[in-house]
Image (cartoon, rainbow, N blue to C red):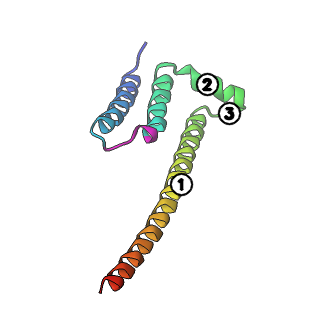
Amino acid sequence: MVSPFQVVAIVSSLLIILFVISLIRKRKLREEYSILWIIGGLVLIVFSIWRDLVDIIARMAGVAYPPAVLLLIGIFFAVLMFLHFTVVISRQEDRNKALAQEIALLKNRIKELEKKSE
């Protein structure tokens, strides 16, 4: 039998996925960054539908309190997100540095050309 909490969990998970898709369509979120969010939403749907899965994973992992597995999975997902965004930020920082150097070189070149033309 489906509990009201299970229905709320499924609907919430679907709303997260639809919100991410909406952000992609509005070009506010790029596809490459949305993959982890969509996977997270799908995992939440699986856990919402198949409630015994948490117990099965807890038994396999030797965890005595099955809801602790949900916390562990949430922490793992958060660490993956942080790592992904750290890589993205690092890449952007390198690009910004290269662009700033290129702008400085171009400004210097413009100044040299202006001096020659005078």
Q: Which residue is mark 3?
A: 64
Classed neighbour count for the residue bearing mark 1: other residues with Cα under 10 Å, few (<14), some (14–19), many (≥20): few
Foreground label between 2 and 3: 2
Q: Which residue is mark 2?
A: 55
Q: Position of residue 95 (x, y in %)?
A: 48, 59
Q: Is residue 46 above or below residue 81?
A: above
Amino acid tagged 3: Ala
Of callouts 2 and 1, the N-terminal one: 2
Q: Is residue 57 above or below residue 118?
A: above
Q: Is residue 75 above or below residue 59?
A: below
Residue 49 placement, left or right of 17: right
Nearest the camera: 20 or 55? 20
* Numbered circle sitting on residue 33: none
Q: Quadrant of residue 20?
A: top left
* Numbered circle sitting on residue 86: 1
Query: Within the magenta stretch, is there residue 37?
Result: no
Gap between marks 3 and 1 measured at Cα = 34 Å
Q: Position of residue 4 (x, y in %)?
A: 36, 23
* Farthest residue, direction top: 1
The residue at the point 49 percent across, 23 percent down is 46
Gap between marks 2 and 1 measured at Cα = 33 Å
Amino acid tagged 2: Asp
Query: Start and end of the magenta stretch?
Result: 28-33
Task: State the SS at label 2.
Answer: helix
Of callouts 2 and 3, the N-terminal one: 2
Foreground label between 2 and 1: 1
Amino acid tagged 1: Thr
Of callouts 3 and 1, the N-terminal one: 3
